[in-house]
């Protein structure tokens, strides 16, 4: 493996984060803190508990997952789109580096940034509500799996998009609504039967449910199903990226 090439891409992408610290780290943390104030304090004062957990504490995993999902996609999609936009992608494709190493550099950096952000938000949440993580290893596993999976998804979007509008379209019109409807702020078991069945078609439900289980051992679906769904989505994204490099879709045409 060409470790120097992977490290060069990784360091370049990570350096972009420190250059845009306000946008990459500070803004998501402030936005999430506002969610705690609005939902945790205002609504939490009217909803005593959800599944035996105080409302303010209950929404913490959902808010962390919300930021990790959106930032993973944003980081990875912009990371690969920008070289396409300025034309340097051809230098990368012609360099002595494999497709796997290119993906590893870009996706690794995007996932790292999202994981750091998720941990900062988790630490920030501890300032608002008491936190107790019952399964820290599972929590980290879900965090890493989700960050990697949605960074791969963002990488696909970055290759597919041929303009900044398309780059924002799927995250804004698809991913964010699915995250809000996926149980970030409530349990899908609270929904009427029909809406509950519809909610189970949302893949984000399984991510948030599994992540929340690692905190409080409460979940909307069995944790085994959450793990299986996450790995399935990961496999689908990897397959699509393999096909993209095999065919040169939006890279060589």
Image (tube, helix red, strand yellow):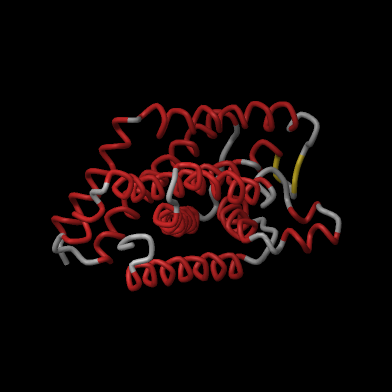
Identify the residue at horizontal 59%, vertical 35% (top origin).
Answer: 130
Task: Judge left or right: residue 109 versus residue 148.
Answer: left
Split into 4 quadrants, where in the image is the C terminus?
bottom left
Q: Position of residue 51 (x, y in %)?
A: 74, 50
Rendered position, 113 above or below 156 = above
Horizontal and vertical percent position of residue 160: 44, 57
Q: Residue at x 81, y 53 (%)?
A: 191
For residue 111, above or below residue 21: below
Residue 209: give x, y in percent of width and height. Answer: 63, 56
> Residue at (48%, 56%) from the top-left corner?
146
In x, y percent, where is residue 41?
69, 27
Residues 212 and 31: in front is 31
Specify whether 145 is left or right of 85. Answer: right
Number of marks drawn = 0
Q: Residue at x 80, y 52 (%)?
A: 190
Is 109 or 160 nearer to us in this picture? 160
- Quadrant in the picture for the N terminus: bottom left
């Amino acid at each position: 493996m060409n470790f120097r090439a992977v490290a060069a891409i990784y360091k370049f992408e990570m350096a972009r984060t420190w250059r845009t610290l306000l946008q990459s780290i500070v803004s998501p943390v402030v936005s999430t803190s506002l969610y705690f104030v609005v939902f945790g304090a205002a609504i939490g004062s009217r909803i005593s508990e959800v599944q035996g957990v105080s409302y303010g504490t209950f929404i913490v995993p959902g808010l962390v997952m919300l930021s990790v999902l959106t930032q993973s996609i944003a980081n990875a999609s912009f990371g690969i789109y920008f070289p396409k936009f300025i034309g340097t992608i051809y230098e990368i494709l012609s360099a002595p580096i494999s497709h796997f190493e290119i993906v590893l550099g870009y996706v690794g950096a995007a996932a790292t940034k999202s994981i750091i952000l998720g941990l900062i938000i988790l630490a920030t949440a501890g300032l608002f509500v008491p936190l107790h993580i019952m399964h820290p290893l599972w929590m980290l596993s879900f965090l890493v799996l989700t960050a990697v999976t949605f960074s791969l998804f963002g990488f696909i979007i970055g290759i597919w998009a041929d303009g900044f509008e398309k780059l924002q379209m799927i995250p804004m019109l698809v991913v964010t609504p699915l995250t809000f409807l996926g149980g970030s702020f409530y349990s899908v078991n609270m929904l009427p039967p029909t809406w509950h069945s519809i909610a189970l078609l949302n893949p984000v439900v399984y991510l948030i449910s599994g992540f929340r289980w690692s905190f409080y051992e409460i979940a909307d679906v069995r944790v085994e199903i959450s793990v299986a769904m996450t790995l399935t989505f990961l496999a689908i994204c990897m397959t699509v990226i393999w096909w993209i490099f095999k065919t040169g879709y939006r890279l060589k045409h």
